[in-house]
Amino acid sequence: MTEIPIWEFAMGDDSTCLEKAQSVRVPHTWGIHDGTRGKLGLGWYRTQIDLAPVSSMRTFLRFRGAYRDTRVWVNGAFAGEHLGSGYTPFVLDVTKHLEDDASAEITVSVDNRPSESAIPIGKSFDWPDDGGLIRPVEWYQTGPVCISGASVNGMPVLAEMNVRNDHGAAFFHVHCTLDGDLENAELSFELYAGAEGSCRPLSDTSIMEETICDLQPEMSFSRILEHARYWHFDRPELYTLRLVLYTNGIYSDEQTICFGFRQLRMYGPEWRLNGEPVRLPGMEWMPGSDPRFGLAESREVIEKMLSRLRACSSVLTRFHWQQDDWVLDWCDRHGLLVQEEVPLWGTYPTDPARQAEIWPVLRQQISEMIEAHRSHPCIFAWGIGNELAANTWPSQQLIRKAVGFVHELDPARQANYVTSTAWNCPRSDGTASGDVMMINDYIGTWHTGVTQMEGWQALIQANPGRVMVTSEFGLCEPAFPGGDAARTRIFLEKMACYRQFPQIAGTICFSLNDYRTHMGEAKVGADSVRIHGSTDLTGTPKPSFFTIQREYCPIKAHRTAHRLTISCRNDIPAYTVKGYIIHCGSKSWQIPTLRPGESWILLHSFDSLPITICRPDGYPVLVL
């Protein structure tokens, strides 16, 4: 695929505004610039591309994210639209609109005005409404037959339970859709160990090859790999599948898919990752918050903020809206488990007519989200909404319907709903209709009328045998006083509570950063923001960040002049420590594999030198 970075841009009621256009680079949003900052309306983009003039080629445009309602013209002809969804990618076949010389003038309108028939609905969302081509736009060409969609699901075959399995047999299931005349077509695949940009680079030699004939427009196949390395957040082992489509022996199209072999399942009140019971710590990052970029973030900004998550030992996160390929590629390669969500936030309409209007958009977004990202091993669950007043019958019906639809499309992953109402009626909240109960805990701030321990005791007693995750907790300024010192205190108090309940298998602190949002209570420069983070808008840590970093570390260490004692935590976090390295001066030692609750002693003369303990991928987790 070839990116189209340079466009002309202007705002106006119709395309004539482009007569006074300025040159911009995509990804782009008008929401951060003087004159158009925070503006709601129509933005217009135009560019010219030159293509290889081959009559048998098909040409496609791929938009990785445009907020929100998008319409596209090619050489003056209407080529298609994408409505109601601003964060999922879409593809248009524009072949019939090309001239004989295969040049193309592309014009795009993007409308970010609130809509009651879009998701998010109206203004019911807590992040910026930056309009524009907020993610890259690409073009590509294929032969007459193409691969219109492909995904891979890799699953380990676990030899043991209750322990961490790192390697063994595995199978991968490939699903693909093909478009065109398949009578003389064949599909070949090659499987490689590793992936570009990962800790284990792509190998030169394939470990499996095959050619498949008798193709169908929609087809699936599965294969066994006898000796596979499993994906784990401490060892994110990846594989690459290359699919190549031929017609009459001539190359027509190809797709390359990165995937991994990983299993995260519920066993009663336990989460088990590749067979091992785990309790995982995490934090949520709110993208689009750096005032210099808004929602049109560069890869460098994305990687900086995700590195902040890993630097505080977060291995679990969630996103309130669908993210770009860049984000999930990074999470695949650096070991960060993700719940990606449809941005259905706030009170869901209870009127049957309004529900009938919104449901097709919700289905569309679920389908597009799963189709685009189901191969990523980092994604453990799909979220179908957040804080929808799930103690009401209409919302509960919606949650059940959406969870069932997710399971139809991707039975290998969990489908979850995030609630803020479980404290009102612990026995009948909508989050119980998801696979994992995801609970936002603002007891003591937004949530009143219940105490911390009593609230969780009532919730767990009402839902025995269920895996639970604290999907949000933290302090929002200036809505509540105390500053970052109060944020630190609240974090420690709530972690002390969560660690007492084994059913709580994960915690997601909200949030990594202060964030831009149209409903913010504070102002930073020209932006409305919420002061809710352990870093500022651009990722600079506050003192609370280092408290989280210490508490989320999977090990505890005690040093004297001649002795270092390492203990693997057995509360939250709780998972096997394997391949961790101690560095002190010019010397290094590998910590033996430690299961939760186990300890190890290293005798050495450390003097006053600093000691750094790193994960297998080199991330420091503890400095003494």
Image (cartoon, rainbow, N blue to C red):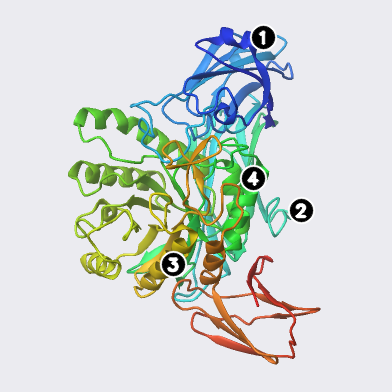
Q: Are marks 2 and 4 in contact (CB under 8 Å)?
A: no
Of 60 and 533, nearer the camera is 533
Look at mark 2 in the image and give the residue it sits on. Answer: 204
The first of marks 1 and 2 along the sequence is 1
Look at mark 3 in the image and give the residue it sits on. Answer: 489
Between marks 1 and 2 in the image, the one whose residue lies nearer the viewer: 1
Label 1 environment density (alpha carbons within 10 Å; few <14, some 14–19, many ≥20): few
586 is higher (above) or lower (below) than 130: below
| Horizontal and vertical percent position of residue 63 | 57, 29
Q: CA distance from mark 3 to mark 4?
A: 29 Å
Of 393 and 579, nearer the camera is 393
* Amino acid type of the residue tagged 3 in the rendering: Arg
On-image quarter of the C terminus: bottom right
Quick check: can you spot residue 145? Answer: no
Label 3 environment density (alpha carbons within 10 Å; few <14, some 14–19, many ≥20): some
The first of marks 2 and 4 along the sequence is 2
Q: CA distance from mark 1 to mark 3?
A: 65 Å
Look at mark 4 in the image and give the residue it sits on. Answer: 301
User: What residue is rendered at 52% in x and 10% in y?
Assistant: 14
Q: Are marks 4 and 1 in contact (CB under 8 Å)?
A: no
* Amino acid type of the residue tagged 2 in the rendering: Asp
* Amino acid type of the residue tagged 4 in the rendering: Val
Q: Identify the mark at residue 99; answer none if there is no mark.
A: 1
The first of marks 4 and 1 along the sequence is 1
* Amino acid type of the residue tagged 1 in the rendering: Glu
The answer to which quarter of the image holds residue 406 is top left
Left or right: residue 547 versus residue 496 is right
Between marks 2 and 4 in the image, the one whose residue lies nearer the viewer: 4
Label 4 environment density (alpha carbons within 10 Å; few <14, some 14–19, many ≥20): some
Between marks 1 and 3 in the image, the one whose residue lies nearer the viewer: 3
